[in-house]
Amino acid sequence: MTMQAVSSTSFGGPEVLRATRVPVPEPLPTEVLVRVTAAGVNPVDWKTRAGGGIAGVLGQPPFVLGWDVTGVVVDVGFGVTRFKPGDVVYGMPWFPRAASAYAEYVTAPSRQLSHAPRSLIAEQAGALPLAGLTAWQALVETAGISAGQRVLIHAAAGGVGHLAVQIAKAAGAYVVGTARTSRHETLRELGVDQPIDYTLSPFESQLKDLDVVLDLVGGDYSLRSLGTLRRGGTLLAIPGGVSEQLAAESQRYGVRATGMLVEPDHQALDQLAALADTGRLRVLIDHVYPLADAAKAHTDGEDGHLVGKSVLIP
């Protein structure tokens, strides 16, 4: 039995993504087979396709990209007790190893998946795991945010950013978010207390004594953010990690600077689902594409103007 998938045939631009037919995977013991109803598209996808990202983990093409997934369990391997056929699940399995979510079916360890939020449609559930886990693991588990803290989120309208805003608000934080003015209304609806248009004036000239900065942009943003933090504050440098220069400068400013790479985590997925099902977490969908149009999804994503996430539908 075969299925449709989208394969990266070589490293390069979106044109290297090609629809193909591959065998349907079979679940090993402790794994489940999931019929995919939606697969999220993330920056790590197009970076890896181009030879960056985690291409070093996946090795040479061809390979099938994608980690975000939601769908229906159709078979379970020996030993699985968490799910049964017919359950609707979601998750980010295998990361950073290949999950091959740009396909009609995936297999995954059962404990890297959770029951999908009941309140979300498939497109939203498929868009949530990688970005939601990144925001949760950064803010809640790494920075340990708490009520009353002041948190700056760069790229607050983006895939990770718009979820991080809501996670920070659910924790009781005061949230500052950077985005173009055209997105400020959306940011306020999500809970941002102080939107800043980074194109009009330097964000660092407007802020000080912050407790946490979540840098989702990279480049010089982390260095520029150091002066906005109080001594003892935390800088989370997500895209680029902590360079030698950033490490040295963070010591001079008396702040903690750390990188982070998201990991599969069914317990955090349960927490995200609870936030969604209690109305405290919305998942914004910028665009929905047929699976065969993955190249178009990458092209649009690399333009950098998405609000929320894009997803593929098999």
Image: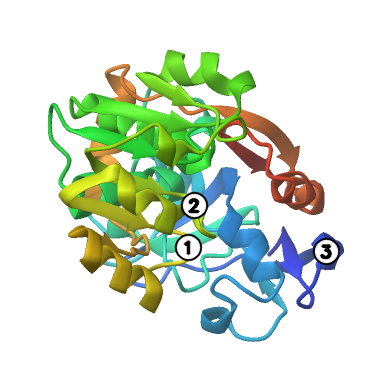
From this view, report whether residue 81 is shown above or below residue 52. above
In front of the other: label 3 or label 2? 3
Choose mark 3 or mark 1, whichever is in front: 3
The residue carrying mark 3 is 18
Amino acid residing under circle 2: Val
Q: Earlier in the sequence, mark 3 or mark 2?
A: 3
Give residue 9's quadrant in the image: bottom right
Q: Label 3, label 1: how many angstroms apart (C-alpha)?
A: 21 Å
Q: Residue at x 64, y 52 (%)?
A: 104
Look at 42% across and 37% down and name the residue there.
205
Mark 3 vs 1: CB contact within 8 A? no
Name the quadrant of the C terminus. Answer: top right
**Label 3 sits on what residue type?**
Arg
Q: Quadrant of the N terminus?
A: bottom right
Residue 126, image x, y percentages: 51, 40
Residue 289 falls left or right of residue 271:
right
> Which kind of residue does numbered mark 1 sit on?
Thr
Q: Which residue is mark 1?
A: 107
Residue 89 percent coordinates (x, y): 40, 43
Which numbered circle lies on residue 284? none
Q: Nearer the viewer, residue 198 or 252?
A: 252
Q: Residue 48's x, y, as percent? A: 63, 69
Of pointers 2 and 1, the one earlier in the residue sequence:
2
Give the mark nearer the N terminus: 3 vs 1.
3
Could you tell whether 260 is left or right of 35 in the image? left
The local secondary structure at tag 2 comes to strand
